[in-house]
Image (cartoon, rainbow, N blue to C red):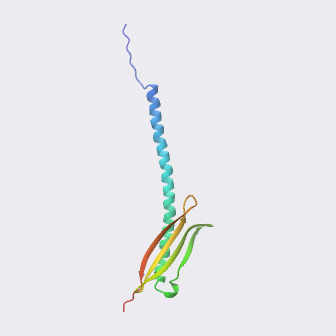
Amino acid sequence: MKTIKNNKGFTIIEIIIAIIVLTVGVLGMVTTAALVTRMIARGQRSAQASAFAARRLERMRVAACVDAQRVNGSDTLYRGSTWVAVNNWTFSDPGNQNYRLKIVSTYKTEQNKTRRDSTETTISCNTFQ
């Protein structure tokens, strides 16, 4: 008598290996998703502080050419009762009616620490007659 073996399908070992490979892939994706979420939040905080500093720089660009308004100072951006960013600006006089404006922006990180970024520009107050 002839026995015909017609084995179709998967063995239990093949199924276990497929489950392990799939699990490792899914765990990698979950870890990457968490990292991307933290990076997006960090970028949003940095962008808010940068936009706040840019607005201050544009306001101070006009003030730089007026002696009474060319003073150092600071301002704070709040969301509700919590501060988001603090700008500190200073003027220096390199001469020839040019003024150097430096804005240091401090903002909170996700671990409630602070980070600082700075922006500098030279403003020319030369008038032609």
Number of disc labels = 0
Q: Quadrant of residue 75?
A: bottom right
Q: Position of residue 4 (x, y in %)?
A: 37, 14
Quadrant (top left/top right/bottom left/bottom right) for the C terminus: bottom left
* Image side of residue 34 versus residue 81, left or right: left
Outermost residue, right side: 81
**Residue name at image x 49 percent, y 57 percent:** 40
Q: Is residue 39 above or below residue 86?
A: above
Image spot of residue 109 (x, y percent):
54, 61
Residue sitting at the far bottom: 129
Question: Residue at the location (51% across, 50% down)?
Answer: 34
Residue 79 in the image: state x and y as whole percent. 59, 66
| Viewer-nearest residue: 94 or 109 | 94
* Residue found 54% across the figure and 78% down from its top: 73
Quadrant of the image for the N terminus? top left
Q: Which residue is located at x 55 percent, y 75 percent?
A: 74
Q: Is residue 41 above or below residue 96?
A: above
Residue 90: image location, x then y, percent:
50, 78
